[in-house]
Image (cartoon, grey):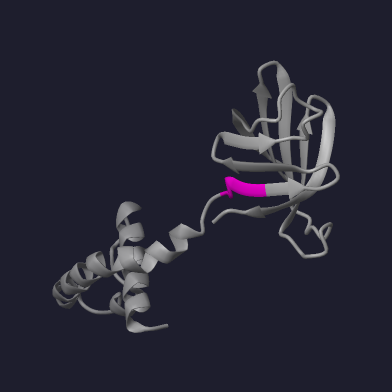
Amino acid sequence: MNHLQHTALTAALLLALAACGQPAQPAAEQAAPPAATAPAAAPVMEAVTEAAPEAAAPAAENDGPITAFSANGFSPAWMAEVNGDLLVFEVPDFATPDASTRTITVERSASAKGVNFDGLDGEVGVTLDINGKECTKTGEKREFTATLTYGGQSYHGCADALR
């Protein structure tokens, strides 16, 4: 553990203890008399206040659920890309009145197997199901298997997270 990480960890512990109403002293300083502890704690807090956000920033980038995916399949060809609550997709032209790209609002729901994005294209139900299982349908490994369901017809393929 380098000095910056140690300092950040000490500050986090001090802040947590202070919030709980406990004495804000690191374990190493608890045996020292009260007069010796107070001056030493103030400079540590100042240094940590500046360093703690930088130390915590990289971990925050990877936290939270994946909300953006790119998926596609063949025989018949289809594609879909979801980012947050917007799904842009194309299904085979025999499945829609026109072969245009569609954009709809979807709701995200997660399960133990993966994540679904559900919405409506007019009155037609649309679901993009991203399964946590690795996909090798195209001969190359992709992160996830995917199924796009449009009006009761399912189209199978692969997907990758957009990061």
Q: Position of residue 103 (x, y in %)?
A: 59, 30
* Location of residue 58 with respect to 124 vertically, above or below: below
State the residue lying farthest toward the bottom: 2
**Who is closer to the viewer here, 25 or 107?**
107
**Who is closer to the viewer here, 121 or 6?**
121
**Who is closer to the viewer here, 12 or 82?**
82
Residue 68 sits inside the magenta stretch = yes
Q: Is residue 113 in view?
A: no
The image quadrant where one finds the N terminus is: bottom left
Q: Position of residue 100 (x, y in %)?
A: 66, 30
> Could you tell me which residue is drawn at 28 percent across and 77 percent down?
29
The image quadrant where one finds the C terminus is: bottom right
> Could you tell me which residue is drawn at 74 percent across and 41 percent down?
129
Q: Which contiguous range is marked in magenta?
A: 65-70
In the image: residue 13, left or right of residue 47: right
**Who is closer to the viewer here, 6 or 66?**
66
User: To which quarter of the image does residue 121 belong?
Assistant: top right
* Location of residue 116 with respect to 24 vertically, above or below: above
> Could you tell me which residue is drawn at 46 percent across and 63 percent down?
59
* Location of residue 39 with respect to 114 vertically, above or below: below
Residue 97 sits inside the magenta stretch = no
